Amino acid sequence: KFPSASLLNNLASPWNVIYPKTYLDKDPNYFKTNVMGSGPFKFKAYTRGATFEGVRNPDYFVKDRPYLDGYKFFISPETSVRAAAIRSGRAYIEFRDLPNAEVEAIKKQLGDKIVVQTTPMTGQFGIAINNAAKPFNDVRVRKAVTLGLDRYTAGKVLYGITGLKLVGGLMRPGSEWAMPEAELQKLPGFWTDAEKSRTEAKRLLAEAGYPNGLKVVLKNRNVKLPYQDFAVFAIQEWRRIGIEAENRPLETAAWFNDGQNTGNFELIIAPTVEFMDDPDQFLGRYVTGSTQNWGRYSDPRLDDLFSRQARTLEPAERQKLVNELQKVVLENAYYMPGLWWMRNVVHWAKVKNYVAQPSHYTNQKLQDVWLSED
């Protein structure tokens, strides 16, 4: 037990649920297939991979809420399908994100019938490096891989089609926990001189025994936005330093299994997305034995720094520890952050009282949302 700097944040997590003990005593996995709660809506129906429906809870503890009689969510991993649902009026809001190209097309068609809320997102797309597998158990090879990605050009190229834009470390750029830009740019992969980075990457590969480069497999989730587009850009970049990478898309379950459960990969697209800007949430994945430590590395310095920052109540002191932890990860290329996401929430103007937040995990209760007449 210890005083936790993130106690209130952790208690507010949207992942926290409370089920009656009597149900869990009978079946510890009851919560996996049964919906319970005291929210503004009650469960109505679910069709796997297609729709989820809720109906107004007449016994909700907030008087006269919710305003809506119910809702129906349409589920699709395809960006074009979600965008088409907005354009046609089949859906009134897209909660996750639509890239700028789709947003502009929707605005051109529907004009002032559409509202777009843009916000930085508490998520970045990076690449997990299997530190336990050759050749990535060699820090020189890991550094070469991260040096080989020009993040500054990537942000310019990918933003319009994916929403990936901001260059940053392990905490969201612009947040109170972000590493100062001047410090970040001293670390491998974040130099502003791309040619200098590529030259150093080639030197490290040669020193590690790969003067002619190497071939690797980059595993990925078979979702286009932004998984596939980010992978394609990274593969093109690596080719310039002599690394030939095969993009191997997997179904979501197989991607999780290979990345998180078994470590069956060399490189794998592994975003870090949390519900808020909090060091406990974002940095716990870098400690020894974490289920989110896809890279299978262990560094006592990281374990110590994470433990100390979690207990440090004074913000300035905690910030120093958070920055130091980020430096250890990035200097050793244990993990390779790519770009931080920008979020476009597109909705019909008739949707009132919805405020987009930096996380698509939060503000989804819809307690205060209402629809105006056409």
Image (spheres, rainbow, N blue to C red):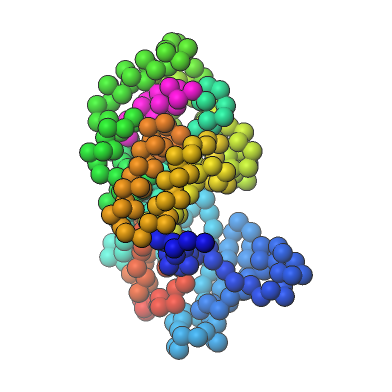
The magenta region covers 138-152
Considering depth in this image, is 85 or 45 the residue closer to the camera?
Answer: 45
Visible residue check, residue 30? yes
Specify the quadrant that holds the C terminus. bottom left
What predominant SS class does the magenta segment belong to? helix
Tell me where residue 104 appears, x and y as whole percent: 31, 52
Residue 182 falls left or right of residue 104: left
Whether 17 is drawn above or below 333: the answer is: below
Q: Residue furthest bottom?
A: 63
Tell me where residue 200 appears, x and y as whole percent: 33, 19
Tell me where residue 194 appears, x and y as whole percent: 28, 26
Residue 158 falls left or right of residue 95: left
Whether 175 is drawn above or below 339: the answer is: below
Tell me where residue 233 appears, x and y as whole percent: 40, 32
Residue 128 falls left or right of residue 324: right
Considering depth in this image, is 248 or 349 the residue closer to the camera?
Answer: 248
Whether 373 is drawn above or below 72: the answer is: below
Q: Residue at x 49, y 23 (%)?
A: 138
Asked if the magenta segment contains residue 146, the reply would be yes
